[in-house]
Image (tube, rainbow, N blue to C red):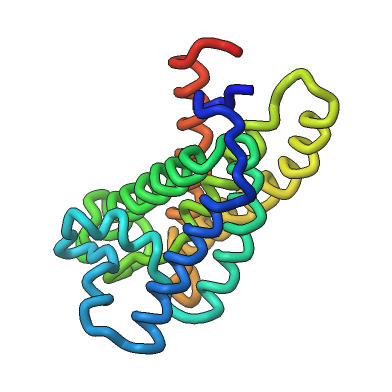
Amino acid sequence: RRGVMGTGRGYDGGNGVFLLLLVNVVIFVADQWIHLPMMKSLYLNHLHPQWWQWVTAIFCHANWAHLSGNIFFLYVFGKIVEEEEGFFGVWFSYLFTGVGAALASYVMLPKVAGGVLGMGGAATVSLGASGAVFGLFAISVLTKLRFNFRKLLEAVILGQFVIERFLSEAKMAAAVGGVGAGGVNHIAHLAGALVGVALIWGLSKMLPPE
């Protein structure tokens, strides 16, 4: 069976998700435990962004709690996406939605922090897999939507959780102006989910039906 992304089922036991988890953990150890100075250059600097930071920032985390929550949801929802779309599909989804979330965050944050619209709370840098994880939330649901009772049931079960999380993020973003307590970037979360929806919609229009 060809997946939504045209990659075929291609499920190989979760190697794609395992590699994503490994990269996130290795970078965290190098940054937060070993304290390699170069690791800070991987964060997305909103005042002076470097080209590589759009990708590297989505593998970085500020502390263990930040990493722990993200890798849990990455494992659960990334595995679902990989089961449907294969190794390439889950990696492409993670990178595409993560970079999209980082770009939205950069644009929506205040001008003094590198944004251009003067919206949201102040932040010097952006880091974390949360935007990509929210993208996987959306993609995991949308790839289940087909005329198959089991798939539809899975989509309903996943969808009610994803919608609840999205609406919660939207309320928090509206209440705090984009960035909440502890530097949580709600704009990036919302953007990641919306980019995930846009990705699946766009691919459904470009690729021929099964």
Residue at left offset 52%, top offset 46%: 135
Residue at left offset 45%, top offset 46%: 91
Find residue 152 and report its horizontal and vertical position in percent: 79, 29
Q: Is residue 36 left or right of residue 176?
A: left
Quarter that holds the N terminus: top right
Quarter that holds the C terminus: top right
The answer to whether residue 28 shows anywhere in this view is: yes
Query: In the rendered view, would you say 62 is above or below 8?
Result: below
Q: Nearer the viewer, residue 73 or 163?
A: 73
Q: Is residue 26 left or right of residue 109?
A: right
The answer to whether residue 191 shows anywhere in this view is: no
Name the quadrant containing residue 26: bottom left
Find residue 156 and report its horizontal and vertical position in percent: 78, 37
Q: Nearer the viewer, residue 111 or 189?
A: 189
Q: Which residue in the rendered view is the most extreme toward the front?
A: 12
Residue at left offset 44%, top offset 54%: 187
Q: Is residue 85 left or right of residue 103?
A: right
Total marks placed:
0
Query: In the rendered view, would you say 69 is above or below 79?
Result: below
Find residue 64 and report its horizontal and vertical position in percent: 52, 80
Residue at left offset 55%, top offset 52%: 15
Name the quadrant containing residue 113: bottom left
Find residue 37 and report its horizontal and vertical position in percent: 22, 83
Q: Nearer the viewer, residue 116 or 209?
A: 209
Q: Which residue in the rendered view is the most extreme toward the bottom?
A: 34
Q: Is residue 126 left or right of residue 16?
A: left
